[in-house]
Amino acid sequence: MTNPEIQTILDRRVQEIAHVAGAVVVSEDGIFQYMSGWPETSSNDPTKDPAQMRRAHGEHRAALATGLNSLTQQVAATDGDDAERVIVEMKRGWCVTSRSGKRSIIALYAAKDAALGQLGYELTLLADQLGPLLDVERREVRAPGHAS
């Protein structure tokens, strides 16, 4: 079940932020939630559905973001701290992740031409905007009269 408002916000921001190739939203426990960017990939294999290949691409990136976040949180915890964001510099680009809400992570993937400071700023705005919406999705429904 996806929230069209979250998808619309994510799509709009990925299109607006310069040099961003795509983004994924994943729960901290590794459940793929949303993705934007990365057009459907083509394959020489006619048996592979482009939409399924795109989703598999998003799920893979979401798993990587979860792993990055987990490792970074463990590093920060050794000093009794929490990690705010993860920045991975690659030869041809950037991956910047941030927590969004209480239990979600957003990862932005951008070309090397992107200004890192701007990416961090835009990711913070996006995380702040999506956080409350993502937290609402994670609420548990309780039966009437069930103790909190």
Image (cartoon, rainbow, N blue to C red):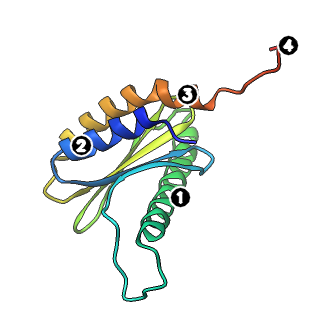
Secondary element type, mark 1: helix
Looking at this view, is 10 or 71 the one in front?
Answer: 10
Of badges 4 and 1, nearer the viewer stands 4
Residue 85 in the image: state x and y as whole percent: 40, 41
Distance between the alpha carbons at the discs numbered 1 and 3: 20 Å
Looking at this view, is 119 or 40 the one in front?
Answer: 40
Q: Amino acid at mark 3?
A: Asp
| Disc 1 packing (10 Å; few <14; some 14–19; many ≥20) | some
- What residue lies at 56% left-to-right and 43% top-to-bottom? 27
* Mark 1 or mark 3, earlier in chain: 1
Q: Amino acid at mark 1?
A: Ala
| Disc 2 packing (10 Å; few <14; some 14–19; many ≥20) | many
Secondary element type, mark 3: helix
Distance between the alpha carbons at the discs numbered 2 and 4: 43 Å
* Mark 4 or mark 3, earlier in chain: 3
Q: Which residue is mark 2?
A: 119
- What residue lies at 24% left-to-right and 68% top-to-bottom? 91
* Mark 2 or mark 4, earlier in chain: 2
Q: Which residue is mark 3?
A: 135
Q: Which residue is mark 4?
A: 147
Q: Is residue 93 left or right of residue 73?
A: left
Q: Is residue 1 left or right of residue 89?
A: right
Q: State whether residue 134 is above or below residue 57.
A: above
* Mark 1 or mark 2, earlier in chain: 1
